Amino acid sequence: MTNEHAIDVRDLSLTYAGQPPVIALEAVDLAVARGEFAALLGPSGCGKSTLLRVVAGLVRPTTGEVHAEDVAYMPQRDLLLPWRRVVGNATFAAELAGVPAAEARTRALALLGRFGLAGFERSWPAQLSGGMRQRLALLRTFLAPRHTLLLDEPFGALDAITRHEMQRWLQGVLTEEPRTVLLVTHDVEEALTLADTVYVMSPRPGRIVTRVDVRLARPRDALTVISAEFTSLKARLLSALEGDAAPEAYR
Ligand SMILES: Nc1ncnc2c1ncn2[C@@H]1O[C@H](COP(=O)(O)OP(=O)(O)O)[C@@H](O)[C@H]1O
Ligand SMILES: [Mg+2]
């Protein structure tokens, strides 16, 4: 297995033990280069979160190999700590990773404005809007300090307008704070707005059925979404999601 990728998944399968056993993933291959933004698109229940947990090292695959460097994982639920203020939540992952508290706090305070949380450092999570909670969970992940971010539907709980704002905002943040990203989503437009590469998974057991390279110029905005190229990529992804892609279309 080569190490030129930040994430390299080879022939990975995962079966949850039980009565009956659940085959969640089957023969998944996926490679993400350093600095690349990859999106994983698939129907609900196809194994996206499972794949992310395997890459995060939280679940062992049944068969296959996983190589992932220096990852920070943001689970599907934001899991903010209600008893910690905004700053305390922002620094939590960094503290766990051994960053001295004062240093984590300085970095958090410096990025608070960029994450739309200036003035809220002493607020409690319960006092924040849904978009602010998601930005705080993202800030915590950015401060982890890791180069590869695994983001599980980070905007899934937001209304469409807020989601679009957050997608545009995340592109800006990544320009200033570059990372390798593997993002899980079930939203085709979100994948095309954010990613360099989009992988489409089949319904469970999840397999990769299609890989699409997205060469749309950045930053991608409301005009990108109505462009002919975006529309044609969207049609390709939707048809792959509907099961029209031949398995050999991948690789
Ligand atoms: N801990 C678990 N034990 C047993 N089955 C699970 C577990 N976690 C997920 N599953 C099952 O595995 C399949 C994939 O789940 P998941 O990875 O959460 O899909 P997705 O994130 O794409 O919606 C689903 O059928 C789900 O019910
Ligand atoms: Mg999921």
Image: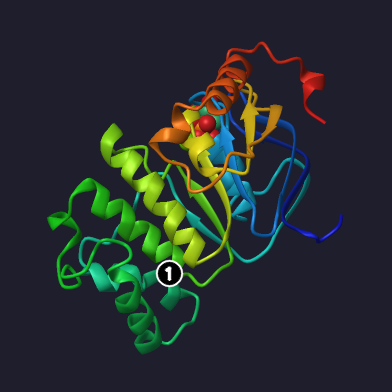
Q: Residue 88 versus residue 249: which sits nearer the camera? A: 249
Amino acid carrying label 1: it is Ala
**Label 1 CA crowd tier, 10 Å (few <14, some 14–19, many 20+):** many
The structure residue drawn at horizontal position 67% and vertical position 11%, both measured from the top left corner, is 244
Which residue is labeled 1 in the image?
Answer: 93
Q: Is residue 189 above or below residue 95?
A: above
Q: What residue appears at the point 53 percent right and 22 percent down from the top-left corner?
A: 231
**Quadrant in the rendering for residue 167:** top left
The residue nearer to you, when weighing 235 against 200, is: 235
Q: Number of numbered discs present?
A: 1
Is residue 30 rendered to the left or right of residue 125? right
Circle 1 sits in a helix, a strand or a loop, which is it? helix
Asked whether mark 1 lies closer than 8 Å to ligand 2, one says no
Q: Position of residue 99 (x, y in %)?
A: 46, 83
Query: Is residue 165 rendered to the left or right of residue 143?
Result: left
Residue 54 vs residue 80: left or right? right
**226 sits to left or right of 129:** right
- Colour mapping: rainbow
Image coordinates for residue 186, horizontal then vertical, percent: 48, 30
